[in-house]
Image: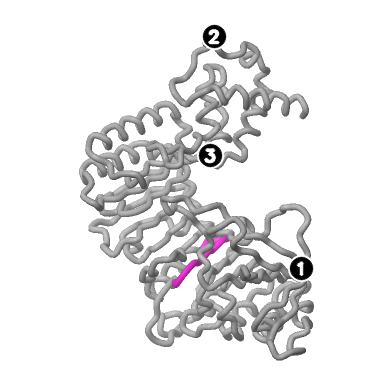
Amino acid sequence: MDHIEATLDTLALTLEHVGSGDVATESSSDLPSYIEALPIELLIQIFEIVCSTDTNFLHLIVAKPKSLPPQAHTLIHVCRTWREIAMHLKSIWKHFVVVDTCPSRWRLRPHEIDAYERKFHEVASLYGANLTHLQFDYNEDFGVDRKGIRRLLKAVLQYSERYTTLKLVGDVFRASITVVNLPLLDELYLLCPRVESPKTITQFCAPKLRKLTLYSPRYYYSFIRLPWEQLTHLSFGVLYTPYPPDHPLSLHEFISLLQALSNLSHLHLTGPVYMVRQRPSLEGLGLSEPVLLPKLRVLEIHDRDAETLFGGSYSFFLTAIATPRLNTLDLIVAQDLINNPHPHFVDLLRRAPLLQRLRVVLAPIDWTGVRRGVWEERYLKMQGDAQFFETYVGDVGLDSEDVLTCDGTIVHHSTPLGPRDGTTTTEGFIDRCLDMDMGPKEHIVQRMRRGSRILAFFKRTLGSRYGVEGGERTIYIHIPIV
């Protein structure tokens, strides 16, 4: 390992002097000769270590502030030997090539689109079969060259047989796509915050598709055809942003979607997933029994407005689904809105005999899931079993201020800043952002306002004796910055 670390130091010094221009040849005189003489086995280990934590994108238009290219992209420009090795290491080609048609600095003019298209074809030729992760941001607004933008989209879809992960963002469905062949696609991300509905139906032929992210679905859910029955992971709904929310689906559309998800194991719902104008019922939806999701193990609900936990009409879908294999339930609600759990929520817990983990985040009222500052959000984490929360006292009511003494550890919200193109996701928020192994935790005893409400929430939600006996109960309580 010491030998590898020493070689990594040499590699880092070498890469500082290597640009991202044309591929160097084996005869380059300015490279140390021993670089090419390194054993292939050692080079493979070095490449995998260097690229294992790489989070850079390859932007065809240079981003501001300028970012470094992905490590794999740099490695293939060192010398021919390194390029040949790197090109055969599929594990290091996980970065996205970003085709962003609405860059922050300017609007694309026709001659820029032409150059952009040529550059994309060059990258596709250079990467070959390693062009597996593609992100396309489509925008026809602001008087841009619509024909040029649509030609660029056609160029992107020309290589669709290579993609294992594809992100389509913006007004892409205005381009009248009818069929997209994606034989290797494993993950699809669609974000289309538009009021205008598409004019045609788009068929995604993706026999290997397992993961789907579908945000702001109201305007094109009915205009896409997907192999819903194949999906194992679905992230669905409307992201929380500072802007007014989109209109969600109807309850009938949402229930119809759930009926097609027979293989789903992970379901993430965010924002106001559906709208309902009257008190719903199974009979009113033509159902004799709840929709069975036989393989669902993880249910994650981001409901900042607390309608799922405490509301009546919106929480109805919890009664309309059967999740006999549910193992983990994650819930994010605004701390200021907590109350007694609605019977629909309690009913879901009662019908989940295998529930092992119930985790709740009491977030600020303006929570979005995207970090706004390095230390701007802190949470107090408390963990135990149902009995721990059912019998917790915390000195509430000993004074007139209605405060609760909470004893736990400090967790910092460590979400990366959201990408400027908006292709973020808050799926897996607790595991990715609040429950990472960051070494010793800072212990804290914190006094929380509205203590009687929080204590009641402990007892009636986290203290409920449902699921596996002795299962994990965890709560993350936002600590305001004073």
Asked if residue 113 lies left or right of residue 405, the reply is left
| Disc nearest the viewer among 3 and 2 | 2
Q: Which residue is mark 3?
A: 94
Instruction: Mark 3: give few (<14), some (14-19) or many (20+) Cα within 10 Å.
Output: many
Q: Of residues 201 and 193, which is closer to you in this image?
A: 193
Residue shown at 36% from the left, 44% from the top: 100
Q: Residue at x 69, y 87 (%)?
A: 401
Which residue in the protein does label 1 denote? 444
Q: Nearer the viewer, mark 1 or mark 3?
A: 1
Q: Please identify the residue farthest to the front as the structure is shown.
A: 482
Instruction: Name the residue at 71% across, 71% down.
Output: 473
> Mark 3 or 2 closer to N-term?
2
Task: Give the image location of residue 379, x and y in percent.
Answer: 66, 66
In the rendered image, residue 87, in percent from the top left (x then y), is placed at 52, 26
**Visible in this render: residue 183?**
no
Question: Would residue 192 be counted in the magenta stretch?
Answer: no
- The answer to whether marks 3 and 2 mark residues whose Cβ atoms lie closer than 8 Å is no
Image vertical order of residue 169 relative to residue 27, above or below? below
Nearest the camera: 212 or 336? 336
467 or 438, nearer to the observer:
438
Task: Using the image, tell me which numbered label, if any, was put on residue 154.
Answer: none
Seen in the image, is 165 located left or right of residue 299? left
Mark 1 vs mark 2: which is more N-terminal?
2
Q: How many marks?
A: 3
Q: Which of the 4 quarters of the picture holds residue 457? A: bottom right
Q: Amino acid at mark 1?
A: Ile
Q: Which residues are magenta?
A: 262-272
* Type of amino acid at the residue the image marks with label 3: Lys
Q: Tag 2's secondary structure?
A: loop
Label number found at residue 29: 2
Q: Quadrant of the N terminus?
A: top right
